[in-house]
Image: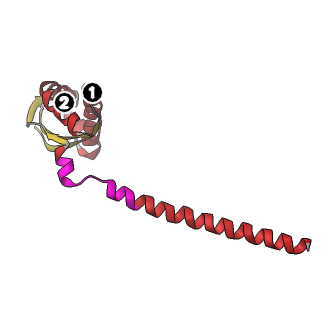
């Protein structure tokens, strides 16, 4: 009888572990699909983002840059605040771009660094929500 109980106990543990593993993996798939459903639509993104004017400014080197950005915020209220703070947003863009040299802005790394620095500066300006991302949509250096 003792041997039979051990076999039964081991069988139950194996079945339990297999069931827990299946639940874990199936649960992950369900979470993954729900995350896809939570992604905002193009209309929702447009409602929470602003495009800046095309801005021309001197660089730290004897060159100048022409830039435009798309700023995605986490809510429509944050977007409204960013629109009301347009002068501060423009000033942050100009001071950030002006801190780079032409050589620093060349390539994907330079643009990514510019976007990241600007995101940090805008996060300090926007108080109602948060800045989700900053994208360079126009970029010329001369």
Q: Name the residue tied to disc 1.
A: 127
- Mark 1 Cα-neighbour bin, 10 Å: few <14, some 14–19, many ≥20: few
What is the x, y in percent for residue 59?
Answer: 16, 29
- Pointer 1 or 2: first along the chain: 2
Quarter of the image where the C terminus is located? top left
Q: Main secondary structure of the magenta part?
A: helix
* Corner quadrant of residue 47: top left
Q: Determine the residue positioned at 53% across, 64% down.
A: 25
* Whether residue 23 is situated above or below residue 107 in the rendered picture: below
Q: In terms of depth relative to the viewer, which is nearer, 27 or 122?
A: 27
Q: Determine the residue positioned at 71% across, 69% down.
A: 14
* Whether residue 81 is situated above or below residue 107 in the rendered picture: above
Quarter of the image where the N terminus is located? bottom right
Residue 36 among magenta residues: yes
Q: Determine the residue positioned at 38% across, 58% down.
A: 34
- Mark 2 Cα-neighbour bin, 10 Å: few <14, some 14–19, many ≥20: some
Q: In terms of depth relative to the viewer, which is nearer, 36 or 100?
A: 36
Question: Which residues fall within the magenta stretch?
Answer: 33-46
- How many labels, in total? 2
Q: Name the residue tied to disc 2.
A: 81
């Amino acid at each position: 009888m003792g041997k039979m109980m051990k076999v039964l106990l081991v069988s139950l543990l194996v079945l339990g572990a297999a069931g827990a593993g299946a639940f874990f993996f199936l649960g992950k798939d369900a979470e993954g699909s729900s995350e896809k459903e939570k992604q905002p639509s193009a209309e929702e993104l447009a409602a929470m983002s602003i495009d800046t004017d095309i801005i021309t400014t001197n660089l730290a080197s004897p060159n100048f840059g022409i830039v435009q950005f798309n700023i995605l915020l986490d809510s429509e209220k944050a977007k409204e605040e960013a629109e009301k703070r347009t002068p501060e947003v423009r000033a942050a863009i100009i001071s950030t771009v002006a801190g780079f040299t032409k050589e620093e802005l060349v390539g994907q790394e330079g643009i990514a660094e510019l976007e990241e620095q600007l995101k940090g500066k805008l996060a300090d300006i926007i108080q109602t929500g948060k800045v989700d991302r900053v994208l360079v949509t126009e970029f010329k250096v001369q």
